[in-house]
Amino acid sequence: MIPSTVGFLNQDFEIAEQPSQTYKMDLEGNSVRGFTDNRDAVKQAVFRILNTERYQYIIYPWWYGIETLDLYGKRVTYVCPELERRITEALLVDTRIRSVTDFEHDLSTKGVVHTSFTVHTIYGDVKAEKEVNV
């Protein structure tokens, strides 16, 4: 006998957002101390995502991080728009991030593309940056 699913799919449910509290990274002291929440937790998540090379560490799921290693040796005219796409794609996985805008590329250092941008979160805007060797 097959169980009845009549009415099961019509039930109301609510999706609750998980709290953003996490351990606080002390980047100067290379340690983890205390906790952080809200805007500071999102800033830390942005830092971690942009400094984790995707597919390189088995501890992270396949969707976590950003791919930058294959950009080495490519033309700057390819790297700049591709970097914008990859940064946006990597960060929008986090549900606290709404959009990524205002990309600016600094090409003053030979062999390096320095990109700065604004991350729009549910807690306010956060300025961030990423450097890639080309």
Image: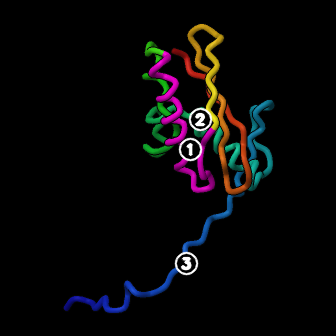
Q: Residue furthest top?
A: 110
The residue sitting at 44% across, 13% down in the picture is: 73
Report x, y in % for residue 44: 69, 43
Tell me the residue at 74%/41% (across/down): 25
Q: Earlier in the sequence, mark 2 or mark 1?
A: 2
Secondary element under disc 3, as helix, strand or loop, is loop
Mark nearer the viewer, 2 or 1: 1
Q: Which residue is mark 1?
A: 91
At which x and y percent is residue 8?
38, 87
What's the magenta region? 76-101
| Residue type at tag 2 | Leu
User: Which label belongs to residue 50?
Assistant: 2
Left or right: 17 as drawn, with respect to 38: left
Q: Left or right of 116: which side holds 87? A: left
* Disc 2 from disc 1: Cα separation: 8 Å
Give the labeled residue for mark 3.
Answer: 14
Residue 123 in the image: above or below residue 8? above
Mark 2: secondary structure: helix
The local crowd at label 3, few if under 14, some if 14 to 19, many if 20 or more residues have their Cα within 10 Å, is few
Residue 10's place in the image compared with 59, above or below, is below
Residue found 43% across the figure and 22% down from its top: 70
